[in-house]
Amino acid sequence: MIRRLIVGFAVSVCVLVVLGVSLWASLLRVPKHAVPHLAGELRSSSLAVDGRQRTFTFYVPPRLRANPPLLLILHGSMMNGKRMRADTAYAFDEIADREGFLVAYPNGYGGYWNGCYAVGDYDAKRLAINDVAFLRTLTDWFRREYKVAANEVFAVGASNGGQMCYRLGLEAPDLVRGIAAISSSLPTPENQTCVASGRPIATMIVNGTEDPINPYGGGRVALFRIFIRRGNVQSTLATATYWANLAGDHGPPEVQDVPDNDPTDGATATRYRWSNTGPSVVLLAIHGGGHTIPLPNVSGPRLLGHTCHDFSAPKEIWGFFSAESHRGE
């Protein structure tokens, strides 16, 4: 009798574990997006930086501009460039086919970037990996191989990749002309390891108000306040205001609602723009949005909240960078 009870209990536990794992997997699952027809070529290479081999893939469109721009696309935690390319629905490659720029998908160290957080238990942080040096070496490689324009390098990142964009904006504004950070905010002073140069830079921020990891209003970075602890961040508005003030704009932003093209997605968006004499700063606030990348036909994991389908973040980001390139011409 006791043996049957033990066996029954063990079976029940196994069933619950299987159900729990299945539920967790379904919540984390990212629907596969069909690879669109792309006219260019995806290539891979590696570079030695600080005694370590660093790898990257990159997309070369068929009609590359002379002295083309370069986009560095930086993945989030526990990811790689290949996954980031899929999670952005290959949209940057599609735009590159039309616009003639290069798209690079570098891989972080052990699946992470050493961004600005002081708190972090991953190797890139513990080993103080110099990712600025890696991205600088990578950019130099593209300048030698493809004659990339000196002032036409931009960085895009989501989550941990967004933190790496902030590091580039703070410490290497000579390397990148503009940054775009998705689902990421500047750390609070006690959680900040980056040393600001004080130079302005074109900045776009795309944050969800219901992000379960990166709190829109500021606070502790953690999944449901339990997992993935990364210390505290400033509010999204404080983050955007920092970059705007750095660019010399201390007034209120222009405010514009983004058309609600998909009323069923649980999210809407508002665009805030600071644009004075210095580099532009834009915040796309995704009301009801989660820790996801806005895309018309692709949704992020359900566990991470709603995905806004009202616009394409890659198109908005490239439009922002392109407009910045043409300012003053």
Image: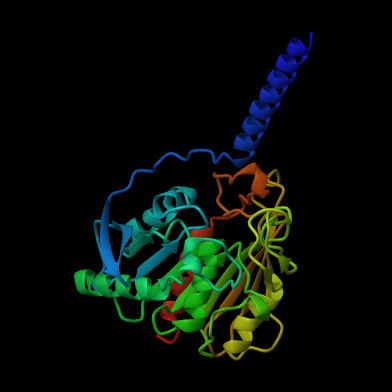
* x and y percentages locating residue 46 in the rendered image: 27, 61
Which one is nearer the viewer's eye here, 106 or 319? 106
How many numbered marks, from 0 up? 0
Which one is nearer the viewer's eye here, 283 or 3? 3
| Residue that protrudes farthest toward the front in the picture | 2
**Horizontal side, residue 79 vs residue 149: left or right:** right
Residue at image coords 48%, 83%: 171
| Residue that protrudes farthest toward the top in the picture | 1
**Horizontal side, residue 120 vs residue 105: left or right:** right
Which one is nearer the viewer's eye here, 270 or 75? 75
Residue at image coords 46%, 66%: 318
For the N terminus, the quadrant is top right
Which one is nearer the viewer's eye here, 207 or 1? 1
* x and y percentages locating residue 260 in the rendered image: 68, 53
* x and y percentages locating residue 59 in the rendered image: 31, 56
Q: Quadrant of residue 208?
A: bottom right
Colour mode? rainbow
Up-down relation of residue 77 to residue 5 (above or below):
below
Whether residue 89 is visible to the viewer of this picture, yes or no, is yes
* x and y percentages locating residue 288 in the rendered image: 73, 54
Whether residue 158 is visible to the viewer of this picture, yes or no, is no
| Residue that protrudes farthest toward the left in the picture | 145
Up-down relation of residue 241 to residue 134 (above or below):
below
**Horizontal side, residue 237 vs residue 78: left or right:** right
For the C terminus, the quadrant is bottom left
Residue at image coords 73%, 12%: 3
Q: Quadrant of residue 119?
A: bottom right
